[in-house]
């Protein structure tokens, strides 16, 4: 019997409150989905490199210390290992320029951070549906 790799959603966000709220939203909307958190782009890259988990989705905040979301996205898309992994930018910025730059760098989607927990729950449910996160466990 062959072993399938264990998959996880990887999230890079430097805001502790956002990580906490994302954890709650994913636990509520897709409890079967494993979620791994990083505090910035460098932490994310190190986690991906050292983890036995395979990413089924990567969620990137844009404004992070050390290595921001744009630079992280650029590095991930340059790596053969992550070229096919869906990457969603999750940012407070609603600027058209940020959205366009994220898409140019290879983001599959761009989501402006919701202002309420209900909208965050809806967003997690949408991500589950859009990226088949039920299989990400």
Image (cartoon, helix red, strand yellow):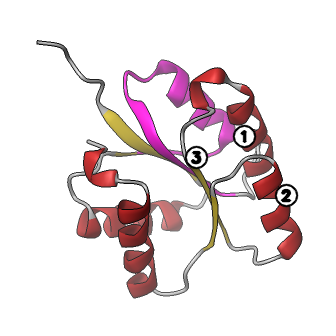
Residue 84 percent location from the top left of the image: 57, 36
Judged left or right of residue 9, residue 134 is left
Q: CA distance from mark 3 to mark 2?
A: 22 Å
Q: Secondary structure at mark 1?
A: helix
Q: Nearer the viewer, residue 12 or 136?
A: 136
Q: Residue at x 79, y 49 (%)?
A: 70
Disc 1 vs disc 3: which is toward the camera? 1
Q: Which residue is mark 2?
A: 101
Residue 136 percent location from the top left of the image: 31, 44
Q: CA distance from mark 1 to mark 3?
A: 12 Å
Residue 115 percent location from the top left of the image: 55, 86
4 up-or-down from 137: above or below = above
Q: Residue at x 45, y 84 (%)?
A: 119
Q: Residue at x 22, y 58 (%)?
A: 31
Magenta stretch encompasses residue 7 = no
Disc 1 vs disc 2: which is toward the camera? 2
Q: Residue at x 39, y 79 (%)?
A: 122
**Mark 1 near mark 2, Cβ–Cβ under 8 Å?**
no
- Looking at the image, is mark 3 or mark 2 earlier in the sequence? 3
Magenta stretch encompasses residue 54 = yes
Residue 66 percent location from the top left of the image: 77, 41
* Quadrant of res 114: bottom right
10 Å crowding of disc 2: few (<14), some (14-19), many (20+) = few
Say the numbered circle drawn on residue 39. 3
> What span is colored magenta in the figure?
36-61
Task: Name the quadrant of the N terminus.
Answer: top left
Task: Name the quadrant of the C terminus.
Answer: top left
10 Å crowding of disc 1: few (<14), some (14-19), many (20+) = many
- Looking at the image, is mark 1 or mark 2 earlier in the sequence? 1
Q: Which residue is mark 1?
A: 72
**Mark 1 near mark 3, Cβ–Cβ under 8 Å?**
no
10 Å crowding of disc 3: few (<14), some (14-19), many (20+) = some
């Amino acid at each position: 019997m062959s072993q399938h790799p264990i998959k996880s959603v990887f999230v890079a966000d430097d805001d502790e409150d956002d990580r906490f709220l994302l954890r709650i939203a994913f636990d509520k909307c897709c409890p079967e989905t494993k979620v791994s958190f990083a505090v910035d782009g460098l932490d994310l890259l190190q986690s991906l490199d050292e983890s036995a988990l395979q990413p089924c989705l990567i969620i990137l905040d844009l404004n992070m210390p050390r290595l921001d979301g744009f630079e992280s996205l650029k590095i991930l898309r340059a790596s053969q290992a992550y070229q096919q992994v869906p990457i969603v930018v999750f940012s407070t910025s609603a600027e058209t320029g940020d959205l366009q730059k994220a898409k140019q760098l290879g983001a599959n989607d761009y989501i402006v951070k919701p202002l309420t927990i209900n909208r965050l729950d809806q967003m997690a449910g949408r991500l589950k549906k859009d990226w088949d996160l039920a299989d990400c466990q």
